[in-house]
Image (cartoon, rainbow, N blue to C red):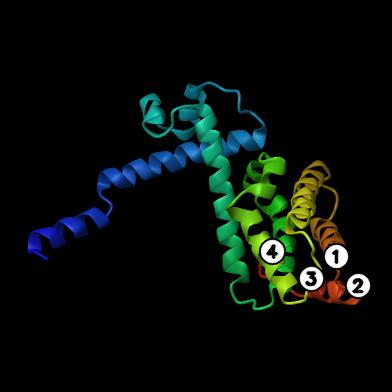
Amino acid sequence: MTEEMSMAIGNEATPTRVDRRKAATRAALIGAAQKLLAEGRQNVPVLEITTAADVGMGSFYNHFSSKEELFEAAVLAALDAHGAMMDAYCADLDDPAEAFTQSFRLTGRMHRRLPELSLAILRAGGGLAYAERGLAERARRDIGAAAAAGRFDVADLDVAMIGVVGSVVALGQFLHDHPDRDDAVITDAVTRTLLRGFGMSAADAEQLCDRSLPDPA
């Protein structure tokens, strides 16, 4: 390989100032869209989105062809952010049943601690069951592994995911609608119900839900 080729490859791999500026603009637009999603305000002019993102009007169309495309990207970004957090919190767990339990318990607590992220994810609704990233991807992986290891009794993974996603959405909406209720108590009660539905004994489900959690801050 020539020196010129090596330099070209190296330059291609290193983000330029323009690349960083573009990435920052895209992130600002997605952040503004997530805030609007959390507020339930998707039907706004593009100008309002760019104003909230503090970017120029022309910048919008350098990244997205429509508001719908932006809001879809905002939901996917929220799913990816949530998935990355769960990976970080559960990376040291060898038992897939414990990994699922801890991830679900942390997700329930996220609804209050990260409300904008939570509400952006909730906008995906039932579509979460078939998402190939974020929460659904990891829950499907952990439930399948727990079933293969004999920790869960799950005959149909798709049916299990319907129950999990339905619980995430209903739990999140309930916690947003009832700020007086204890999110940890409610979340752990829902988690125990799911674990029992996966064939786990009451004692084992209680034991998993009694374990300490990483600080979700």
Which marked residue is nearer to the observer: mark 2 or mark 4? 2
Which three-letter amino acid code belongs to the residue tagged 3?
Phe
Q: Residues within 10 Å of mark 1 (few under 14, many from 20)?
A: many
What residue type is disc 1 on? Answer: Arg
Depth check: give the residue in front, 49 or 86.
86
Instruction: Name the residue furthest right.
Output: 202
The residue lying toward the viewer, choosing from 217 and 68, is: 68
Query: For the N terminus, which image quadrant?
Result: bottom left
Residue identifier under label 4: 103
Residues at discs 1 and 2 in contact (Cβ within 8 Å): yes
Mark closest to the chain's N terminus, 2 or 4: 4
- 73 or 109: nearer the viewer: 73
> Disc 4 versus disc 3: distance between alpha carbons?
16 Å
Q: Is residue 23 left or right of residue 191?
A: left
- Badge 1 marks a residue whose secondary structure is helix
Q: Position of residue 24 (x, y in %)?
A: 39, 44
Question: Where residue 200 sits: x, y (%)?
Answer: 85, 71
Is tag 4's residue or tag 3's residue first in the polypeptide sequence? 4
Q: Give how far apart the Cα atoms at labels 1 and 4 are.
A: 13 Å
Which mark is first along the chain, 2 or 3? 3
Residue occupied by mark 3:
152
Inspect this view and state whether residue 217 appears.
no
Residue at the front extreme, as displayed: 155
Question: Which kind of residue does numbered mark 4 sit on?
Answer: Ser
Foreground tag (1 vs 3): 3
Residue labelled with disc 1: 192
* Residue 94 percent coordinates (x, y): 65, 78
**Tag 2's secondary structure?**
helix
Q: Which residue is mark 2?
A: 202
Circle 3 SS class: loop
9 vs 99, left or right, is left
